[in-house]
């Protein structure tokens, strides 16, 4: 889907405040509310934007936050990924290149729960050859929002010294 300049401006406002009413967005952009509502609906239907309640694991009592890299038997990759996706503690899974075949993020109430997870749950998954756990000590930035491509292109052009 090719994003228009208006789509980009709507996405930018929603990334700053996802609860901003369409009427307020329309006022800020000088566009009719019906146009803004239509654009938002189109962006949602095209899966360009999603509306979710993002929780803060630390505030919810999950003080142990980790990223785990896995080296796996490649023939078992799809099965392993599916098994990771089914685990409640796991909130992000990616198949990767480089030193690990799979990287995933998970949260736990404490190190005892992390240990139990590694031994009992990861240990029960066939095809995992090696794990490496990265324990997050602090998370100073936690934001999942990307600028629309048009803003990125303008920033790149400014860096090159050309007019956007």
Image: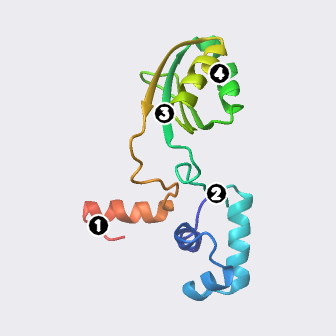
Pick the front one: 155 or 59? 59
**In the rendered image of this protein, does residue 101 appear above or below residue 46?**
above
Choose the circle earlier in sequence order: 2 or 1.
2
Question: Comparing marks 4 and 2, which lies closer to the viewer?
Answer: 4
Find the distance from the CA under tag 4 to the CA under tag 2.
Answer: 34 Å
Location of mark 2 (residue): 48
Location of mark 4 (residue): 121
Residue 89 visible (yes or no): yes
Which residue is most to the left? Answer: 161
Q: Residue at x 56, y 49 (%)?
A: 57
Choose the circle earlier in sequence order: 1 or 3.
3
Location of mark 3 (residue): 67
Pick the front one: 26 or 158? 26
Choose the circle earlier in sequence order: 3 or 4.
3
Location of mark 1 (residue): 162
Choose the circle earlier in sequence order: 3 or 2.
2
Secondary structure of residue under mark 2? loop
Q: Residue at x 56, y 39 (%)?
A: 109
Secondary structure of residue under mark 1? loop
Q: How many numbered discs sit on the rendered protein?
A: 4
> What crowding class fits label 3: few (fewer than 14 Cα within 10 Å), some (14-19), or many (20 or more)?
some
Choose the circle earlier in sequence order: 4 or 2.
2
């Amino acid at each position: 889907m090719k994003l228009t300049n208006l789509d980009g401006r709507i996405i930018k406002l929603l990334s700053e405040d996802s609860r901003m009413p369409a009427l307020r967005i329309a006022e800020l952009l000088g566009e009719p509310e019906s146009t803004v509502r239509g654009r938002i609906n189109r962006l949602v239907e095209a899966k360009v934007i999603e509306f979710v309640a993002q929780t803060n694991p630390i505030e919810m009592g999950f003080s142990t936050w980790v990223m785990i890299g896995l080296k796996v038997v490649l023939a078992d990759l799809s099965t392993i990924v599916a098994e990771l996706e089914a685990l409640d503690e796991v909130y992000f899974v990616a198949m990767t290149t480089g030193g690990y075949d799979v990287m995933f993020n998970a949260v736990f109430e404490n190190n005892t729960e992390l240990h139990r997870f590694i031994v009992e749950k990861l240990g029960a998954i066939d095809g995992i050859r090696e794990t490496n756990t990265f324990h997050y000590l602090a998370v100073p930035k936690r934001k999942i929002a990307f600028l629309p491509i048009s803003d990125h292109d303008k920033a790149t052009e400014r860096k090159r010294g050309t007019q956007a």
